[in-house]
Image (cartoon, rainbow, N blue to C red):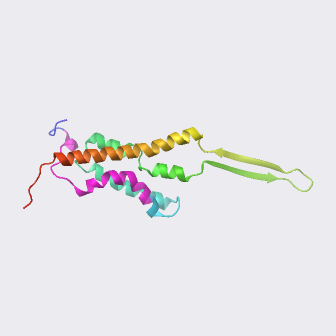
């Protein structure tokens, strides 16, 4: 795309300091926000996690460092960054609830419900995607940012 018809794809003329934080806010913002938001998987922790990650999305979207394609990929490739992997690792793989019925002179009958939440193979695959995709995206955004910095004109200091 040409700089004249690209809109947000136009090349930046200067670097913003916040742009250095964007890949890392997208990658770790959800986890940091979750940990700051409270001890435990309550609504407050998830709200703070979403706000922290959205700060990275807002900085990404308002920057001229990245193309529209980079902005869309950075936003939608595993929203929340590593928070999904963090949450998946933190939840139990199996769960069961058992109740027993019986009385004096009667046999005890135990009834269990539940089981694995994900088959092990699917769980490993999901965890791998939730770990790899956000890291690859953050590395990509950082490479684009550094390439953009190298292409900026050098302004002599006075």
Image coordinates of residue 87 in percent, x first then y, are 51, 52
Report whether 56 appears left or right of 108: left
Looking at the rendering, the stretch of residues picked out in magenta corresponds to 6-33
Task: Single out the residue that lies furthest toward the left.
Answer: 158
Quick one: 137 or 106, which is closer to the camera? 137
Q: In the rendered view, would you say 33 is above or below 61? A: below
Magenta region includes residue 31:
yes
Task: Single out the residue that lies furthest toward the top.
Answer: 1
Image coordinates of residue 147 in percent, x first then y, are 22, 45
Quick one: 157 or 28, which is closer to the camera? 157
Magenta region includes residue 97:
no
Q: The C terminus is located in which quarter?
A: bottom left
Q: The N terminus is located in which quarter?
A: top left
Q: In the rendered view, would you say 121 is above or below 94? A: above
Q: Which residue sits at x=34%, y=47%? A: 138
Task: Single out the residue that lies furthest toward the right.
Answer: 105
Q: Which residue sits at x=50%, y=44%? A: 127
- The tally of labels here is 0
Image coordinates of residue 133 in percent, x first then y, are 41, 42
Q: Which residue sits at x=28%, y=49%? A: 61
Q: In the rendered view, would you say 109 is above or below 43? A: above
Q: In the rendered view, would you say 36 is above or below 135? A: below
The image quadrant that residue 123 belongs to is top right
Report whether 27 appears left or right of 15: right
Report whether 114 appears left or right of 33: right
Q: Which residue sits at x=67%, y=46%? A: 114
Image coordinates of residue 136 in percent, x first then y, are 37, 43
Q: Could you tell me what secondary structure mostly forms the magenta stretch?
A: helix
Quick one: 83 or 158, which is closer to the camera? 158
């Amino acid at each position: 795309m040409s700089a004249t018809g690209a809109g947000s794809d136009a090349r930046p003329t200067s670097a913003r300091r916040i742009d250095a934080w964007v890949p890392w806010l997208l990658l770790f913002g959800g986890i940091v926000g979750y940990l700051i938001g409270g001890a435990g998987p309550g609504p407050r922790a998830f709200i703070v996690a979403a706000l922290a990650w959205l700060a990275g999305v807002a900085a990404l979207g308002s920057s001229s460092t990245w193309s529209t394609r980079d902005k869309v990929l950075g936003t939608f490739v595993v929203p929340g960054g590593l928070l999904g992997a963090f949450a998946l690792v933190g939840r139990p793989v199996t769960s069961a609830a058992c109740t027993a019925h019986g009385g004096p002179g009667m046999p005890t009958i135990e009834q269990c419900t539940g089981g694995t939440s994900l088959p092990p193979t699917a769980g490993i695959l999901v965890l791998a995607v939730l770990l790899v995709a956000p890291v690859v995206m953050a590395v990509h955004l950082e490479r684009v940012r550094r390439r953009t910095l190298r292409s900026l004109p050098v302004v002599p200091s006075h």
